[in-house]
Image: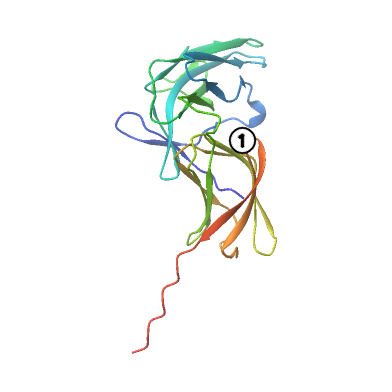
Amino acid sequence: MLKSTSTHVRPAGRALAFLLGIGTVPASAVTLQISPVTVELAQGQNGTIFTLSNPGQTPIHGQLRVFNWDQVNGEDVLSPAEHIIVSPPMTQIAAGQSQLVRLVRTGQDKRHKEASYRVLIDEIIDLHTQPPNGVMVRMRYSVPIFLDNGLTPDDRSNLNWTLLCRPKHWQLRIENKGNRRARISNVALEDGKGRKYVIQKGLLGYALSGRYRTWDLDIPVNTVFGAQAIVKTTINAKESINKAYVQCPAAPAPRKAR
């Protein structure tokens, strides 16, 4: 019930759109394992590690890059990181072996109480078989990174939910007015008659602190929700029931006959 959404990477001077996690091989062929799947650095912590493991039968070649992660106009936007580095930038993991990856702070990111980054891991074809004009990416993985810049126990996510009816589809907008991100999963809507629409089983995505995120919904455009819809979901591993306010543009007034 969820249409595909895109993330934008902004290298210097231009933007490139791509889908995180999209590859050229089926899911059954994915071999790289990442632990933990979310990385956090506490306030005052200058670095941390996560592990890449290869349980497969052939070596894995990978390229690692770290980006600032923001949300602009309802979409995820990545730009070159300024206050954190990842090492090593390239790796080769033998069959049955693991690789420690280090993240190191190089400065203080004071944009938010909680700064957000993503490490992109491109599983690439063996460097010896690469074409001369580029790098062939076999699979892309994305690891969310969160840096504590002074959070307190009282800081938390604070979400506003809105259902927007567009001319050809519905859209879900989640605004986070809190100081912590919201990890949103297992989302279902109920209309005024109690009919249920499953939007996403598993992870939907994140609403970062002080930002909003939108998702296009694959539900009938003529669905009637009334003034509010019920949203049943899981937020930061806790089940939650919320109200989403429905916003539809007013129909134009009929013209008077002359």
Q: x%, y% of residue 198?
A: 66, 50
Could you tell me if residue 48 is visible in this image?
Answer: yes
Q: From the image, tell me which residue sits under label 1.
A: 236
Answer few, some or many: residues within 10 Å of disc 1's Cα (few below 14, many 20 plus, some between 14 and 19).
Answer: some
Quadrant in the picture for residue 95 = top right
Name the residue at 49% across, 39% down: 178
Q: Which of 228 and 77 is in front in this view?
A: 228
Q: Residue furthest left?
A: 13
Q: Where is residue 149 in the image (x, y as percent from the top left)?
A: 45, 24
Q: Is 31 situated left or right of 150 in this image?
A: right
Which of the two residues, 255 or 3, is positioned nearer the viewer here? 255
Can you name the residue that lies furthest to the bottom here? 258
Total of numbered circles in the picture? 1
Q: How is the image coloured?
A: rainbow
Say what secondary structure mark 1 lies in: loop
Residue 206: x %, y % from top left: 54, 38
Above or below: residue 147 compared with residue 106: below
Residue 128 in sight: no
Q: In this view, does 131 lie to the left or right of 14?
A: right
Q: Which residue is drawn at 55% across and 48% down?
A: 3
- Name the quarter where the C terminus is drawn: bottom left
- Closest to the observer: 256 or 54? 256
Q: Please say if 213 is above or below 62.
A: below
What amino acid type should be assigned to the residue bearing mark 1?
A: Asn
Would you identify the image quadrant in which residue 67 lies? top left
Residue pictured at 50% horizontal, 23% vertical: 122
